[in-house]
Amino acid sequence: MRLLFVLILVGSLAGTACAGVGSTPGGGLKVVTTTTILADLVKNVGGDRVSVTSIAPAGAHVEEYSPKPEDARKVADASVIVVNGLHLDEWVEDLLKNKRPGAVVVTVTDGLAAIDDNPHMWFDAELARKYVERIRDGLIQADAAGRDAYGRAAAAYDAELVKLHDELKRKVAEVPAPRRKLVTSHDAWPYFAKAYGFEIVGFVQPEGDKDPSPSELAALVEKVKRASVPAVFVESQASPKLSEALAKEAGVRNVVADIPTDSLNEKPADTYIGLMRTVMERIVAALR
Ligand SMILES: [Zn+2]
């Protein structure tokens, strides 16, 4: 009886330890990322050789994240720190003062052609492939003995991203071209729109968490009316109130909530690939 209890206890502790991005304790190369999306990419390249933790948790509004005291400790413990760059996660700059000498900092957007300095490049799976290359190289720099393992895992994951990109393009084809229009919560969509053929009509929050002024909102209502969009999308981390008001004013009946953008979310959006599929499926279902 007592043995059974111990086994159950051990089983449930092991279950806890394995749950979620960033909770992997113990050995391996310690990697810290700013976002859960980056943590998932690192897991796919690093496998068992790494233990990865994201600073901003799943569901977080990354641009508005305020670092906590334990985040400085996470950075101090890390051998590799993976950052998106382009102001998405600029709060990491202060934390980086705590990094240990020789820690490798990988900024995944470095050297990539940005659209208006917008940081949301992972929304084009072809650009996520570039993120993966940079993560692979950073892991090898910190852990040369893992070169072959990282190379193999990165190549296998890259093949999945190529498939994902094709799958997303096929999915868009279900929406008639004049209906491929996006009205969203924040300015997260230029790479997605360019890669998969959408027009961005507008977004509710002109910058970060700030609400639009009444005249900004009125201008957006006019744009949305003129574009006769089929739906308005609300992102997971954003309040739906303004989007609902906008939709009502503009005569759009369909308001689609809970579109994940900057952070992983509940299943099936709990991996990068799952998130991209979820986003595309919800958008296509609402617009077609
Ligand atoms: Zn964002």
Image (cartoon, rainbow, N blue to C red):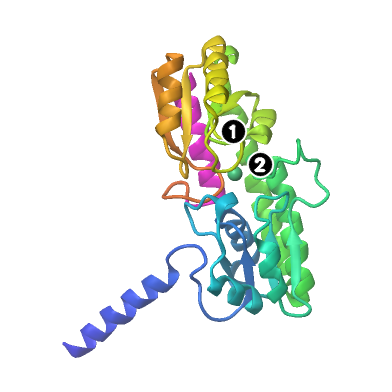
Horizontal side of residue 194 vs 9, given as left or right: right
**Badge number at residue 125:** 2
**Which amino acid is tagged 1?**
Leu
**Which amino acid is tagged 2?**
Ala
Q: Give how far apart the Cα atoms at labels 1 and 2 are.
A: 9 Å
139 or 3: which is nearer to us? Answer: 139
Q: Which residue is mark 1?
A: 168
Coordinates of residue 80 in the picture (x, y in percent) = 70, 70
Residue 89, compared with residue 12, is above or below; it is above
Residue 287 in magenta stretch: yes
Q: Main secondary structure of the magenta part?
A: helix
Coordinates of residue 3 in the picture (x, y in percent) = 23, 88
Asked whether mark 1 lies closer than 8 Å to ligand 1, one says no
Give the farthest residue toward the front: 214
Assign the N terminus to one quadrant of the image: bottom left
Which element type, helix, strand or loop, lies under badge 2? helix
Which element type, helix, strand or loop, lies under badge 1? helix
Residue lying at 83% horizontally and 49% vertically, measured from the top left: 111
288 or 53: which is nearer to us? Answer: 53
Residue lying at 52% horizontally and 36% vertically, measured from the top left: 211
